[in-house]
Image: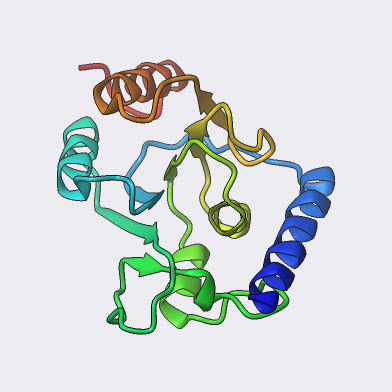
Amino acid sequence: MIFSKIKKYFLQKEIQQSSKTSKRVVANNKVKNIGIVSTMELNDVYEFEQKVKKLFPKHRSVNWYLFREFHKGDEKSFHHFSDNDFNWKGKINDVSLQIFVDTPFDLLICYFDTNHVFLESLVKQSQANFKIGFSNVNQSLFDLEISERIDNIDSFHAEVEKYLQILGSIEAS
């Protein structure tokens, strides 16, 4: 319990410090590699992934990671992470999660609409070229913020498509 609070404290402090000093440079490349970060509240990951693939038909890969609370009985998954994957100073100690963070995605879709220190830390550390998320989360995280309800997936995808067409990252349909 106390270690969890220490982790959250260090992660929050790191996010705040890097928010003050970070300068984003956004590439104008076509989207090929896509990363998705969300919580277990995303009920149908497969449906969400299919909509992303439909939006980007010429993509190379879609990789995703979902946050879930740590329970000792949970099996290790290469698509889930928990607070247990961070050490007490807030650094990632899981190899597969670190590989995900170090992957230079052309687009990182951050599908969560509340402040969540572990997800925010993951997004902040990500080497993605362009990050999209919800507007009611930490504004320093994203290059493009969408103001939409989280349960309205179709509208979110329509907004993402519209703005990426304007930016020239995808072809007009």
Which residue is painted at 30% across and 19% down in the image? Answer: 155
Q: In which quarter of the image is the N terminus?
A: bottom right
Snapshot quadrant of residue 117: bottom right
Q: In which quarter of the image is the C terminus?
A: top left
Which residue is painted at 15% across and 41% down in the image? Answer: 47
Snapshot quadrant of residue 170: top left
Which residue is painted at 25% across and 54% down in the image? Answer: 61
Image coords of residue 28 (percent x, y): 50, 33
Snapshot quadrant of residue 142: top right
Q: Which of 172 and 66 is in front in this view?
A: 66
Reply above or below: 169 against 21: above
Q: Nearer the viewer, residue 54 or 145?
A: 145
Relative placement, left or right, of 59 versus 160 is left
Image coords of residue 10 (percent x, y): 76, 66
Reply above or below: 50 against 97: above
Relative placement, left or right, of 67 versus 64 is right
Relative placement, left or right, of 136 versus 148 is right
Q: Which of 104 and 3 is in front in this view?
A: 3
Image coords of residue 27 (percent x, y): 54, 38
